[in-house]
Image: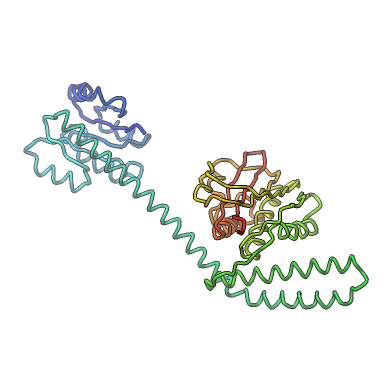
Amino acid sequence: MEAKIMFVDDESNVLDGLRRMLLDQENDWKLEFVTDPNEALKRLKSSSYDVVVSDIKMPVMDGLTLLSAIRHDRDTTDTEVIILTGLQERDLKRRALDLGAADLLNKPIIKEDLTARLQSVLRMKQFRDSLKTQNMILERELQQSQKMEVVGTIASGISHDLANILTIIVGFSELMNITLVGNPKAEKDMNRISKAAIRARNLVGQIRDFSRKVETVHESVAFPALIDELVDLLRCSVAKKYSVIWEGSSSSGRLFADATQIYQMLMNLCINGLQAMDEGGTLSLSLEEMDLHDESQPELRDLTPGPYFHLMIKDEGKGMNRVEIDQIFDFSLSTKSDEGGNGVGLFVAKRIVESHCGGICVESQTGAGTIFHVYLPCAG
């Protein structure tokens, strides 16, 4: 990106000389020349500049006062400042450095010296900006980690009681099955209740294990059958304004995975799709096996080439813009209303996919719905 540099000196002939001196740099640097320090401050506050080169002695406002104002204003504090001084101005030089000048340049100015100092200061600013960005990323990740620690603490406290309640539900549903022999419809409904309760109990166990950092156990899982079970549950439980389309899959491939975590991931993505359709609509699921090689999506570039399941979950919701897509898996982000959720589901879904050596990416446009693409390696 083109560097933006401002020169400040009360003598216009000095600025004209600097302009002529740097004519060959105009393709790389955007140069501005200002005779009034107050005007310079106005421009600095209204637009971002990389470097200010200021004379130290000016009648309206000297260079040190200008430097101090730049350093103490939140809008301009990241702008680097080079002070132009005379050879004899030792005390002023020391004060300039104390105030945060990036460099000092003696008069008379030599072109090679000026360009070298500017290039050095620009490199230093680029390095500092990069460090600042990295620090912001680390701070955001630390905040996420602290949030997850709170979630783990809460989960550990309630998971035992929930597991006990769900065990009672499972037990009584099994007893009810005995009394429902000969009533196929009621027996089928009770089996659904039992399966859902068992899944919920397993999910509670996963939350408890996660908070205790217990290793999960992977096994061979029939992925299409798991989707069959989820879709069957969704069709029986969602409101009539929604429809769930899943034509099944002829694939006999299997995953080496934790079945409960994969089920949780599927549930999170489907619930997210349903909640995105406020007025109702269709949620579509499809599954295929494919050979994954070098993919264009950044989320998939690190995946090991080979056979993968490709799951697509499509909704007819309002869709997302580019900013929302880039942040959709952040822990605290939610595009839902206050009562719709807090965005944790997609964060967890992504973590589950990645823990199974897979990848997930999003395709969406505002007003055109959303498609989640999930890639999970087939078991050998």
Residue 135, image x, y percentages: 38, 53
Q: Quadrant of residue 366?
A: top right
Residue 86, image x, y percentages: 10, 35
Q: Viewer-proximal residue, 286 or 8?
A: 286
Report the residue at 57% width, 72% height from top: 209
Report the residue at 32% width, 33% height from top: 3
Quarter of the image containing the N terminus? top left
Residue extending farthest front = 380
Figure colour scheme: rainbow
Q: Is residue 37 above or below residue 358?
A: above
Quarter of the image containing the C terminus? bottom right
Q: Viewer-proximal residue, 136 or 348?
A: 348
Q: Quadrant of residue 121?
A: top left
Report the residue at 59% width, 55% height from top: 377
Left or right for 251, reference 144 = right
Residue extending farthest left = 88
Residue 172, image x, y percentages: 80, 77
Looking at the rendered structure, the number of numbered marks drawn on it comes to 0
Report the residue at 77% width, 70% height from top: 194
Left or right for 309, reference 143 = right
Left or right for 119, reference 338 = left
Q: Is residue 2 above or below residue 227?
A: above
Q: Viewer-proximal residue, 159 or 8?
A: 159
Residue extending farthest right = 182
Residue 323, image x, y percentages: 54, 43
